[in-house]
Amino acid sequence: MMELNATHDAMRRSWLASANAPGTDFPIQNLPLGMFTLGTDATSMPPRPGVAIGAHVVDLCGLDDAGLLSGDAARAVRAVLPNDCGLNMMMALGNGVASALRAQLSDLLREGGPQGLRERAQTLLHAQADVHMHLPCRIDNYTDFLTSHAHTARHGRFKGLADPVPPVFHSLPVAYHGRASSIRVSGTGVRRPNGQWKAADGSIVFGAVEAMDFELELAAVIGSGTALAEPIALDQAADHIFGYVLLNDWSAKSVQWWEQMLGPFLGKSFMSSISPWIVTAEALAPFARPAPARRPEAPPLLPYLESHQDQAFGGMNITLESWLSTAKMRTAGKGPTRLVSTPLSNLSWTFGQMLAHHTSNGCNLCTGDLLGSGTVSGESEDERACLTEITSAGREPLRLPDGDERYWLKDGDEVTLKARAGSPGRIPIGFGACAGEVLPALPYPLPKG
């Protein structure tokens, strides 16, 4: 378990009032990192690193230029050069360097702290409403896991499998290698894809997919990478996780089910969305909890997937939500409706186990790699974390408060993911939003004649 320090102090408050507001995602105990530009910046201006605090963003490069950072904290910021890597060079320095930056930021932003940042607040602080967020890091690889028993069981029943949950689910964290090139930051519209699938009458069709779905996930972001052919022990896995983001693994279900012999392909690769702020592993330390209990039918863990440390502290007290806003709702001035509220404890495997298994054959992980949790579904109805489960694979409609119904997402629907970590005696922290609106499919460029 990562040791707690003064940055986690529940009594610590910021001189920024918005950071102390009840319900804020970004109190001084959070301090997540991201990449931003201002609306007034030229389009050629490269994104620069920032930290979210209340309703504001602190310009880290400006903070360093003003001489307000020193030692490893300044080294962390200076590692983020004007290039297309985002925070990668900072993350590659390791969690110790990130911890030094966090400590200095917390001191500069706390009530009674040094006056330097407060005196320069006008130039170093920007309202979040005035910034444009970018991908927080370059993502070269993306692995998505399948770790919710409830999600696996429901999909298995929808497919008519004799054994809805294959035995391998209980022995290892199952995963597939996703498409990193189509990952986009929150706020990017998701274009309805074209695809091939088997229709209800048995015919094979191609066109704009109908069974468009969201999937509510959390993803770990790799900090310091691992070497080829060198597995990482479970107790060292946390050293390689820099932080976490929300992940919407948009899915074209009919395409996925038709094509899936080797694993997901075009039913998943058209786009995935992540939230712009990386909530660091250190910020989440106060919310550690025991790993999920093993199911009665599960065999004993193999030694490489079991440790006292992971069993005692490998889970996290995080609740995830998904919200739906339709075009009709927005026209009527109505707010979104919540579809899902589900705890991360619905997963059968910890992120440490996911990483340890991923590297167990010697596969190397790179800085910025993304490890998705898989859909975080639970047993109860309000914990069904995708439309496929909510509508029983398109058989039963989701009835919205305004009388509309959904079997699958329609054009103009906007899905927003949220999450908060909380434990007794601790200040809750959030992840910001991961949002995307479904856009109409583009006409497919068929040959003329």
Image (cartoon, rainbow, N blue to C red):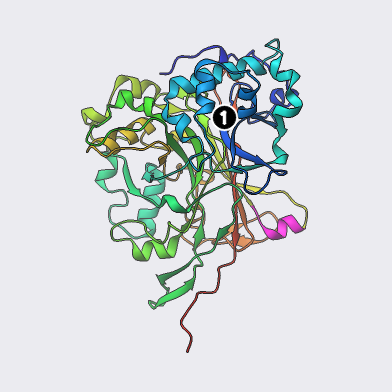
Q: Residues within 10 Å of mark 1 (few under 14, many from 20)?
A: many
x and y percent of residue 433 in the render?
61, 41
At a point 42% along the width and 26% down the height, the residue shown is 93
Q: Nearer the viewer, residue 440 or 162?
A: 440
- Please give left or right for residue 409 compared with residue 89 in the image: right
Q: Residue furthest bottom?
A: 449
Q: What secondary structure prevails in the magenta region? A: helix
Mark 1 residue type: Pro
Q: Quadrant of the N terminus?
A: top left
Q: Which residues are magenta?
A: 325-331
Which image quadrant for residue 443?
bottom right
Q: In the rendered image, is residue 205 in sight?
A: yes
Relative to 237, 277 lies left or right: right
Which secondary structure lies at badge 1?
A: loop
Q: Is residue 327 magenta?
A: yes
Q: Which residue is mark 1?
A: 32
Q: Residue at x 75, y 23 (%)?
A: 17
In this orientation, does residue 384 appear? no
Q: Quadrant of residue 9?
A: top right
Viewer-proximal residue among 165 and 235: 235
